[in-house]
Amino acid sequence: MHKITKSLLAALLGSVVLLVAGTAMAATSVSWISPPDGSSYLAGTNVAPTGQASGVGSTAGSGLDLALVIDESGSMRGNGIIAAKSAAIALVNSLPQDSTSVAVIGFDSYSHTYRQLTALNPDKAAVIAAINSIGTGGGTNIGAGVQAGANALVSGHTTGRQMMQVVLSDGQGSYSGQAATAYNNNQIITHTVGVPGHNESQMANIATEGHGVYTNVSDLNDLQSLFDGTSGNLVGLDHVDIELADGTWIYDIAIDGLGNFILPDQVIALGENTFTAHAYGDDGTFASAVLTLNGTGNAPVPEPATLLLVGVGLLGLGALNRRKDKKK
């Protein structure tokens, strides 16, 4: 089906769903992350705006603080932990590097913090090393992992960013409402991913309490493409379309597993440059967000240091000319 038709259908379905479900249903959201709305650039400048969309909850903010919470119990030994690590690394590599920080948490009978919240730029390698250091053994205390993830997010939080955790498990374990507490106290969204062997109702309940999305992965081979966004995502999105400043469209723009997207370089024209993101959720709801960037025709104002250097240069040329005159 052509994207415009699909978008209109999603809009109609979204209206019906909202009328039936009212405020009980979490709606799709989308927002621009950078640059700030209303920013100005010299006409001709290349800019690559970034944004985030989700099928549930809010996406407002200046970036993302993320906790990866991974089951490292004995049952994950072998292919399970290998797939989980590969998927987590794929997600880290696909996230916006300049506006994302990541914490790495493992849990068995207890929780283990392998890496506190760390900015991907410049320390992505340290985050990946922490993921690779996760081992296996012990029981399954999901609640301890969720609590450790929330603690890492709160203690290292960058003001203005959204806080989120992704919890992956293959089993059924101890849990007593930690995701609900994390959301109620700190608006931390908890998404859950169940791999073969997990308790579906428990993982779905954790996501519901954390105002997130539960994803059932029946084949470990699908895990990496889900996390990096090349085949599905973790946040309940169907697709995102972008209307560019010149009136053309990018349909189904590439998103990572958490709904982040980056526009290819846009050449800023003189005057207002308006970009509109249209996000469509798996539940039929939709949302739009507008970013306006201003193109100016004025040359950049010289920095004081630059003016000083120019002045010193002119003085030097004047002195040189005077010495030449004396020799004549």
Image (tube, grey):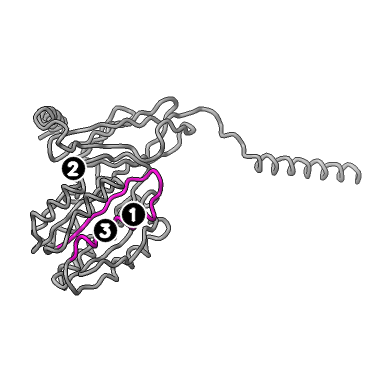
Q: Which numbered mark, 2 or 3, is in the foreground of this view?
A: 3
Q: Tell me how far mark 1 sits from mark 2, CA to CA.
A: 24 Å
Marks 1 and 2, the one that precedes in the sequence? 1
* Dot 2 amino acid type: Leu
The residue at the point 24 percent across, 61 percent down is 145
Residue at (40, 60) in percent of width and height: 123
> Split into 4 quadrants, where in the image is the C terminus?
top right
Q: Residue at x 29, y 40 (%)?
A: 59
Left or right: 124 with respect to 311?
left
What stretch of residues is rendered in magenta? 141-169
Q: Residue at x 38, y 40 (%)?
A: 34
Task: Residue under label 3, please give it.
Answer: 147
Secondary structure under tag 3 reads helix
Q: Nearer the viewer, residue 204 or 303?
A: 204
Earlier-in-chain disc, 1 versus 3: 3
Q: Which quarter of the image is occupied by the N terminus?
A: top left
Badge 3 crowding class, 10 Å Cα cut-off, few under 14, some 14 to 19, many 20 or more, is many
